[in-house]
Image (spheres, grey):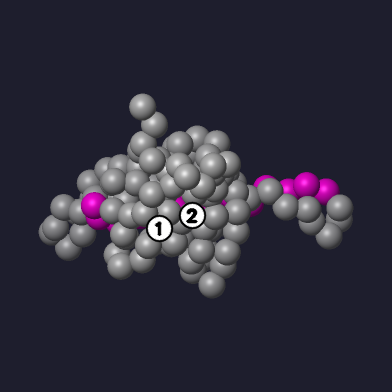
Amino acid sequence: MTIFTGNISKAAETRTVDVGGVKTLVTDFNVAENYQGRDGKRHTQFYRISLWREPGAKLAKYLKLGRSVTIQGRVKARAYMTNEGVAACALEMSNPQITFNTANPTEEVDAVIEGDAVPFPAEEE
């Protein structure tokens, strides 16, 4: 289990994918975690987060660029080739627990996602 706090570095996008002949919603967004390495320098680690089905689609409007979130879940590493033909690795999480970090806790309301309570801010007007 991994827990980290970071900022959304790519706003959420919801799309429909075919999973075994069934059209399924998936919402993807990226989170950047900043940390200080052993070398004393600042580093950034990027994670791709996927939220499946209706709960992800409902949360998408709150997953805005720059928003601070704490993520808890299992990380999966995936190897791939870049457009330039260079081998790379992506860190991904599917359906993690998400906590929105807000300055004013009274802005938070509760939502239920797959049986887990996940706090998220009230919709801005």
- Per the image, the residue denoted by label 2 is 99
Number of labels in the image equals 2
Instruction: Name the residue at 50% across, 35% down.
Output: 65
Which residue of the protein is positioned furthest toward the front in this rendering? 106
The answer to whether residue 31 shows anywhere in this view is: no
Which residue of the protein is positioned furthest toward the top in this rendering? 125
Residue 10 part of the magenta segment: no
Residue 42 part of the magenta segment: yes
Instruction: Residue 34: give x, y in percent of width and height.
Output: 68, 48
Point out the tag, 1 or 2, that comes first from the N-terminus: 2
Amino acid beneath label 2: Thr
| Residues shaded magenta | 41-54
Which residue of the protein is positioned furthest toward the right in this rendering? 40
Which mark identifies residue 118? 1
Instruction: Residue 26: give x, y in percent of width and height.
Output: 30, 51
Residue 111 versus residue 65: which sits nearer the camera? Answer: 111
- Left or right position of 74 against 109: right
CA distance for labels 1 and 2: 6 Å
Residue 125 versus residue 7: which sits nearer the camera? Answer: 125
- Left or right position of 4 against 75: right
- Left or right position of 81 against 115: right
Above or below 62: residue 119: below
- Locate the N terminus by quadrant: bottom right
Instruction: Residue 27: give x, y in percent of width and height.
Output: 34, 47
The answer to whether residue 69 shows anywhere in this view is: yes
Do tag 1 and tag 2 residues touch (Cβ < 8 Å)? yes
Residue 23 versus residue 82: which sits nearer the camera? Answer: 23
Amino acid beneath label 1: Val
Instruction: Name the residue at 29% across, 46% down.
Output: 58
Label 2: how many residues lie within 10 Å, few (<14), some (14-19) or many (20+)? some
Q: What is the chief secondary structure element of the magenta stretch?
A: strand
